[in-house]
Image (cartoon, rainbow, N blue to C red):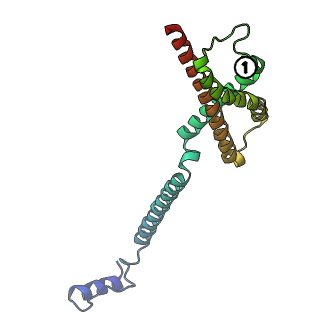
């Protein structure tokens, strides 16, 4: 220690100096300064990591269904299954059209007069569904040749949902036809 330091230390002990001098070597030592700077840097790094985590959480909440890997895999598998279904329809288009146009080729339906009214009410719905089928198949051909880009995926998903709803209506119509025909057949058998 230098003589100045020892004088200042002695003055502090006897109470002559109540606060340590700002120029004291204890308060301005380079080791202490380096420690403070290191602590500040570590606090800054922790603060930046916390901000990064908060930003990631905020972003993931805003785009949860778009960027979550499991959600993407679910959407990809759903679209893949739908694509395979549409492809099978397109490859078997002629067979499907033939079955829808002439489901009882070479056969006939014995229809009692009391059921003519029920069948006549059901027949226009069947005819309308069959008449719309070529237009819907063209839509499916377009869909099969179209690729989905990231920018327009929302609009295409809406188009897909409308197609699915449309084919759901066709399915319901065909189910009603099938049910009425079964009821007619069962009643004919029981009579």
Residue at image mark 1: 96
Q: Which residue of the protein is positioned furthest toward the bottom in this rendering? A: 16
Task: In this rendered view, identify the residue nearer to me: 90 or 104.
Answer: 104
Q: Is residue 47 above or below residue 170?
A: below
Q: Is residue 142 above or below residue 183?
A: below
Secondary element under disc 1, as helix, strand or loop, is helix
Task: In this rendered view, identify the residue nearer to me: 89 or 20.
Answer: 89
Which residue appears at 54% of the width and 55% of the height? 62
Task: In this rendered view, identify the residue nearer to me: 124 or 51.
Answer: 124
Q: Which residue of the protein is positioned furthest toward the left in this rendering? A: 14
Image quarter in which the N terminus is found: bottom left
Which residue appears at 30% of the width and 86% of the height? 8
**Is residue 183 found left or right of 13 in the rendered image?**
right
Which residue appears at 70% of the width and 15% of the height? 103
Which residue appears at 65% of the width and 44% of the height? 158
**Image coordinates for residue 54, horizontal then vertical, percent:** 48, 58
**Is residue 24 found left or right of 103 in the rendered image?**
left
Q: Residues within 10 Å of mark 1 (few under 14, many from 20)?
A: some
**Is residue 60 found left or right of 158 in the rendered image?**
left
The quarter of the picture where residue 148 lies is top right
**Image coordinates for residue 128, horizontal then vertical, percent:** 71, 31
């Amino acid at each position: 220690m230098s003589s100045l330091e020892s004088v200042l230390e002695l003055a502090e002990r006897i109470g002559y100096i109540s606060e340590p001098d700002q120029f004291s070597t204890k308060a301005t030592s380079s080791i202490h300064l380096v420690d403070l700077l290191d602590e500040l840097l570590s606090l800054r790094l922790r603060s930046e990591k916390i901000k990064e985590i908060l930003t990631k959480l905020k972003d993931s909440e805003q785009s949860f269904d778009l960027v979550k890997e499991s959600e993407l895999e679910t959407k990809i598998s759903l679209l893949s299954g739908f694509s395979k279904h549409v492809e099978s329809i397109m490859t078997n288009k002629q067979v499907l059209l033939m079955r829808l146009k002439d489901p009882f080729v070479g056969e006939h339906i014995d229809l009692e007069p009391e059921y003519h009214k029920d069948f006549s009410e059901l027949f226009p719905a069947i005819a309308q569904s069959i008449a719309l089928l070529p237009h819907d198949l063209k839509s499916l051909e377009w869909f099969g040749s179209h690729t989905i880009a990231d920018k327009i995926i929302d609009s295409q998903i809406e188009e897909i949902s409308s197609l699915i709803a449309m084919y759901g209506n066709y399915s319901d119509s065909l189910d009603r036809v099938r049910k009425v025909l079964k009821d007619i057949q069962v009643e004919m058998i029981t009579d």
